Image: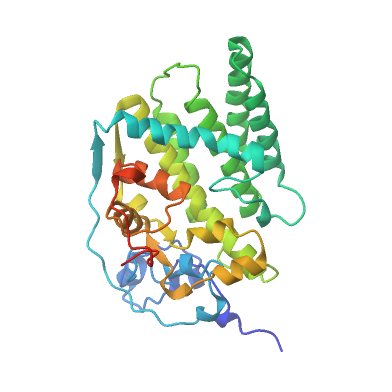
Amino acid sequence: MPADRSKRLTLRRSCQACVKSKRRCDQGWPRCGRCLGKDINCEYVNAPFTVTSTGISPAWQYMGVDYSIANATFTPQILAPLQLEMMKEPDPNIIQLLVAGLRDLPVKFAQNNKNIFIHPDLYTNVLPIPVREIHSICKLNIQTGESSRVTFILSSMLRQHSAKIYRRLNQAASFEELLGYSQAFVLIQCILLFNEDGTKRPYSEVISAMLAGVAGKLFQQAPIQLPHALSPRRAWLFAESVRRTIIVCFMLRSAYSLNTRKYSVRTPFVDSLPFDLRTNLWDNDSDIAWQDALSDSRDSMVSLHEWSDGLAAGRVYDVSSFSALILAACKGRAVFMIPTPPVDYHMDR
């Protein structure tokens, strides 16, 4: 007997009426604009992004976390709007800490096939073409040394490759391809924007807009259903890779602005991005170790705003390199500047 389609895990964010009519949904709550105008019922499989009790969409909670809660009932709550926050004249040491951490991402990837937002275990056989290409480029970047002529030639090549990748990600035939090109684009920008030759390039609104556009495209085109063939760990790695790539896009955009203009603006959308508390799962290298470290999925997701607040208040134990970059980007603080949390808490909420 075929499976009941209505009970399948879905990441759809549009309301049922708009899906049925094949119309664009503005995801308004409690009724979208179209349903409100027609005075008809407006029902969501997943509540809109800004109205859940945790500040994130249940759709993002479902992305590979726990298939057993796919049919759970949620009671949406409207949160108070998050305010724009402009970080002016931050500590230069914090800026350099953030820049150094992002500059190190291509190096880590070249050395280990892995960094804070790319995980090799997501792929069964070989890395996707765009990820494999950027791996070779990252290795070449390490090998160039201090030769100014070689560095100039490499930078020129990277700018051309960056333009090609950006065109291809806008023409991606699948979401997996889009994710691969997006990750490659981010790594190239980490090399170009934070080169070590001391050259300060003028701030480019185009580059900033491209980074924001990549993050927005990933968020908007996230698949409405995860492949059933994925194991629980690979499903989680897929979802976490998407979440982390989006966060790193905005982190890179912020660091670029801080490094060139000495200020950065964070928006409510960035603060509302979903974040998985269980950062230790990223570094569990086997299905068994991953399963052993798995905690209760129902309480694992918070917003980036909640997570950064918890970091700054010292409510997070065992801060990872990913968390340290978030702390610098969102709060302008280093790990040594925060209180030491209780050893028996991962995050005390």
Q: Position of residue 267 (x, y in %)?
A: 31, 47
Residue placed farthest to the front in the image?
343
Residue placed farthest to the right in the image?
125
What colouring does the structure picture have? rainbow
Q: Position of residue 346 (x, y in %)?
A: 40, 64
Q: Position of residue 286 (x, y in %)?
A: 67, 63
Relative to residue 345, is residue 155 depicted above or below? above
- Given residues 212 and 155, the one toward you in this image is 155
Q: Is residue 195 visible?
A: yes
Q: Residue at x 69, y 85 (%)?
A: 2
Corner quadrant of residue 129: top right
Q: Residue at x 54, y 74 (%)?
A: 66
- Identify the image quadrant of the C terminus: bottom left
| Total marks in image | 0
Q: Residue at x 35, y 57 (%)?
A: 307
- Given residues 339 and 102, the one toward you in this image is 339
Determine whether, in the image, residue 18 is placed left or right of residue 182.
left
Relative to residue 187, is residue 37 depicted above or below? below
Q: Position of residue 157 (x, y in %)?
A: 63, 22
- Identify the image quadrant of the N terminus: bottom right
Q: Residue at x 52, y 26 (%)?
A: 192
- Given residues 27 and 160, the one toward you in this image is 160
Residue placed farthest to the top in the image?
149
Q: Is residue 217 visible?
A: no
Determine whether, in the image, residue 339 is placed left or right of residue 107.
left
